[in-house]
Image: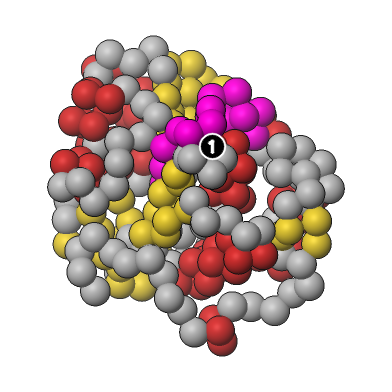
Amino acid sequence: MPLLGQIARLPLKLIAPGRPRRVLTGALRGATWIPASGPHGCWLGIYERGAQRLLRSLVRAGDVVFDIGANVGFYALLAARLSGPNGRVIAFEPLASNVAYLCRHLELNCLENVEILQLALSDENGRGFIAESAGPSMSTLASEGVPVEVARLDDLVDSGRIPTPQVLKIDVEGAESRVLQGARLTLARHRPKIILAAHGWRQGNACSRALRELGYTTSQLRDGAVDGNYSIFAS
């Protein structure tokens, strides 16, 4: 597979069964969703309601949004709805099983403004591994596991392969600081607004420090003292 990844083309057998439903509430209300693909909060519409509201306030029609760690597509669908037909969403997701659901969700909702890059963003280019011990929704870069393509965001943008973004959502289960390290030039030059999920206080501190060094103002949206899951907004 080339370094920059490909728009996913996966066999149907990878797409798990499940009767689609309409999302009941929230910013994605009315969208078609496969309940078996993720937490029930997704199709109920209550999944990470604070982040939903924040993304809704940030994304404008025509914006370019990067969904880094797209999983099965909840935020990619939301960003596609908010940015509209003239906007563009780049969904970065390395795991084939997640990409299969993501592709199906895009198909069910007739969305054509989302491009999937089946790779993991980090601070280097080449090959890496994803550990799936806690399940596909909790996978992260590791020293062994499922082999994946790895790329730096700066190189993807500088090459012209993807456009410059206005908004970034980052949730990569503990590798957030590595994503930021590989995106320093893009962040410094274009200053997209960022919603970042940091897993563990070390990641939270490292990410906040890296963003402030780049001139961002950061605020903590969620204190992870209880479960280690922090949420940061940077602008």
- What percent of the width, then of the height, locates residue 128? 25, 64
Residue shown at the point (80%, 62%) measured from the top left: 21
State yes or no: residue 210 in magenta: no
Query: Is 55 or 213 nearer to us in this picture?
Result: 55
Q: Residue at x 61, y 42 (%)?
A: 81
Taking 61 as reference, is 152 left or right?
left
**SS class, disc 1:** helix
Q: Position of residue 4 (x, y in %)?
A: 24, 60
Q: Residue at x 81, y 42 (%)?
A: 25
The answer to whether one can see residue 118 in this image is: yes
Residue 63 vs 173, above or below: the answer is above
Q: Quadrant of the C terminus?
A: top left
Name the residue that disc number 1 marks: 83
Question: In the orientation shown, which residue stands out farthest toward the right?
Answer: 24
225 left or right of 89 in image: right
Amino acid type at circle 1 is: Ser
- Vertical order, 165 against 16 (above or below): above
Of 125 and 190, nearer the camera is: 190
Nearer the observer, 15 or 30: 30
User: Which residues lie in the magenta part?
Assistant: 51-70
Give how far across and how far down residue 36 sits, in percent.
71, 68
The N terminus - image quarter: bottom left
Residue 200 in which image quadrant? top left
188 to 36, vertically: above or below = above
